[in-house]
Amino acid sequence: MSAELKHTGALDLDLVRAACLEAGVVLDEAGGLGGGPAVRPATEASLGVLISALSALPTRSSQSTVRLVPLGGGGQLSWCRPDASRSPKDFLQLSMRALLGDESSTGVVEYVPGDGTLTALAGAEVAVLRATVAEGGHRLTPAVFGSCTLGGVLAAGRSGLDRHSLGPTKHHLLGMRMIDGTGRHLRSGGRLVKNVTGFDLHRLHAGGRGIFGPIVEASMRLMPAPEAEQYLTSGACASATAAVELALAIRGATRIREQAVFVRDRVVHVLLSGRDRQVEADRRRLEELLTNLEEHDPGPGAEAFHMAGDGAEGQGSAVRVSTVPSRVAAVVAALEGSLGELSGAVIQPGVAQVDLPLDGLSSASSWPALLEAQLSLRGPLPESLRSKIATSTMGTSTVATGPASQWSRRLVEAFDPAGLFQTEGFPARS
Amino acid sequence: MGSGRKQLSRQHLAELERIVGKKGVRTDATARAAYESDAFMLQRANAEVIVLPRTTEEAAAAIKVVRDAGLVVVPRGAGTGLSGGARPVENGAIVGTARMRGVLEVNAEDRYARVQAGVVNVHLTAACADVGLFYGPDPSSQTACTIGGNVGNNSGGPHGFKYGSTNRHVLGLTMVDSEGEVIELGGPGATGDGGLDLLGPVIGSEGMLGLVTEVTVQLLPRPEKVETLLCLFESLDDCCDAVSEMIARRLEPSAIEILDRLTIEAVEASVLRAGYPDNAEAVMLVEVEGGDEEVDATSADVIEVAREFGAFDTRRTTDPVERKRLWAGRKGAFGAMGRIAPDLYVADVVAPRTRLREIVTAATVACRERDLKLANVFHAGDGNLHPNISYDRRDADEVRRVLEAGRIIMEACVEAGGSLTGEHGIGLEKQDEMCLVFSDDDLAAMDQLRGAFDPDAFWNPGKMLPVRGCREIHTRPLPTHAQPAEDAS
């Protein structure tokens, strides 16, 4: 089956049963998310055999097919695999959590505090990993909460609010092991903070939404936990645009070393972190820019901060507008002008990103600002809205064109020739 | 493509001259000699032609001609690479970026710059100094190496400890593929949400996936304060242990470098004269950047650890002139070693930062047993070691011993959980050793990646990936990187 074929048929359970039998994996025909079929391989070896067996099976007709979706916590499913949301029975859910073994396992393969590196199984929960390394005085980026798994976060290309100062999550990825669509166990990179040995295949898989096969294990660079942290919020500004302008002023004040800054519901949220005295000094400088500054206790403040900033990626369903910092205020002003208050929108001026929840958009009657903006669709738009945002409005930067489109196609053919892991619309190609 | 490649005809030559001008096409013996190797001089070859375009458009048109002539292409920046990655393929073409030196845009507000691939690293930082910004990666060869070359090797540098290597700073690329088509990847405002991260594998691909002609990089705000620290040790081992302890205590300077006695002597005997003292077995050069309070606190912590581990003297300076002198010594160390012997083998290996001392010892023993002169200067904070072995390439037996020692150092690193290269790349030098780290399947996957971008092996063929299979090389991945137990059978 060519990887170019679109998967429109139902899942061929007979073929799946045969492959599961060969791999010694139990098929749970209705025990997955949404009552869909799921498998929970307990070993990497059996997972490899299962994928290999499935890739070798012929597709019986165009009406039936075999598709696998690697799943961590399942939180990224709706936007990461938009076609998978049609019916959970149309694909086989591949749980990566079972590889952790018993429920008490953290999934940590190796944590070397003296080297500042962590290697963990893909099914490990990020929150658990963060707690583990915190005991050794480190922090793991991204700072995400909930039941997200390391593999899920990496495959989805998800970053936290600390992207503002630390860059995207993939910049902290040192290497990984994965199983491709033919069942091969592959490795790239390593466990070292610096390493240029061979092609960086792991950078391709990060954000690859699992289309080359499941990530099994990943190694991450850790950052030292800061000596001090302050979670701060401004009073409510007159508009989201005004709040964004304040946030941009903070970004431009090079004598303030904010770790993260974002706007939600006309409030500016700021995280300061670092050495004790430096954070105090930064706080004093920040007070010159923001009035009614409120400090929150570190524990609940941290969680509230990250929950408030949990935009498109956390909500799993939103529209993302990406631009450059100098255009953020103009974009937000245009959106505010046409859509109203932008309630629930998360705006990160430093990384020039605006995430709009779909709930707020569904009642909107005016779309010119969105149509002008550079859009990335994050999740399935309701049918009622699809007609209002033409596919052609997706940003050119997100659509591979010409040779790059061929590169993407050939990569898929090389690593998943049977098309087991393919999803419609990704990677976007001309 | 494959065997039976055509020769460059007069018509092809004339067409190339029409596209890039006469100065941009070199076939004379002098030019061929200048381009016969990069800074890894143990392997040389003659290119059929050297083509030096000035723009992306010229490069794209020239590639079509070269392809039509049946030649393969080795992309080349300044030729400062140390692994043979830019060595010509016999009778192939070199397409160099030496005339692509334009800084096309510096955007202070959005903190990015767009440059031609041939812009020299240090010129980029100079071009954005007026607006209070700088470019993070700073290879020791930054006064000569190019941004395009940095992309090819995913270069780092001393300040990579804080800022990371090139792949953390590239926002977008303009490339030419083997058909002469121009491709734009990424850009200042691109999130990549809708597609694969093709930038990821291209950066560090050693010129094997296409010709990079323009690069968009992020720029960083200049820190409020910068302090350089010099810590002097009577023992190289103690100096290494002090670095491991700094990492363990989670200190965050921007650079931690070590120079050993032979390196210090070479630097001080050269025109660089950094002012390193003559009574130290090892010098640790540390830089701390940030806000006033942050720098003061971190510098104090660094000195405390250094003293705990036997530093007999420490110095601190924020004076720009003195700082520049100290760094000139470090960055010019490789050049200064020319005083020791005519040739220098610069090893580039990575070890876990907890095991610096044992790798330095392994290198010392390997060189002592082979009667070789070893000087160490390295990015200790990243675990990126550069054991430098001085030799004379006219002495065939010495060359053999140098390569043998290099192999032993690589094996020691991999056995310790390290890797073959931190910033110089695999090139020709370490192809066979790839089998120490990766399985046949891993290497096949890398070859498939290459084939997806370049099905005809047009770009820099015969580099990085082992030409012979690992079974033929009789090497298997060392135990550190074996599959999990359940799969080992």
Image (cartoon, coloured by chain):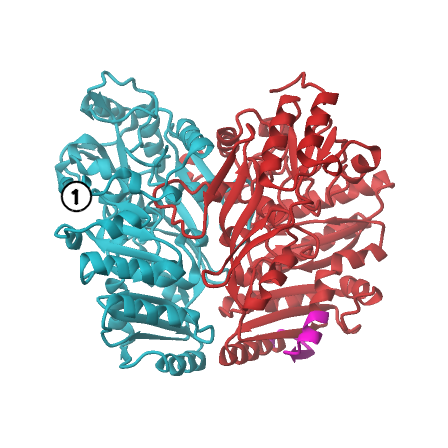
What percent of the width, then of the height, locates residue A78?
22, 44
Locate residue B339 relative to residue A130 in the image: left or right.
right
Q: Any idea which chain is the cyan one in this picture?
A: A
What percent of the width, then of the height, locates residue B343?
81, 48
Residue drawn at (38%, 27%) of the image: A182
Which residue is tagged 1? A385
Instruction: Determine if residue A188 is in view.
Output: no
User: Which residues fall within the magenta stretch?
Assistant: B308-325
Locate residue B69 relative to residue A170 in the image: left or right.
right
Residue drawn at (33%, 56%) of the image: A353
Q: Quadrant of the C terminus of chain A?
A: top left
Query: Does dot 1 land on a helix, a strand or a loop?
Result: helix
- Which chain is mark 1 on? A
Q: Quadrant of residue B54?
A: top right
Magenta segment includes B312: yes
Q: Nearer the viewer, residue B365 or B4?
A: B4
The amino acid type, in three-letter code, at marker 1 is: Leu
Q: Is residue B191 above or below residue A45?
A: below
Q: Quadrant of residue A160?
A: bottom left
What percent of the width, then of the height, locates residue A50?
31, 29
Q: Any idea which chain is the red one in this picture?
A: B
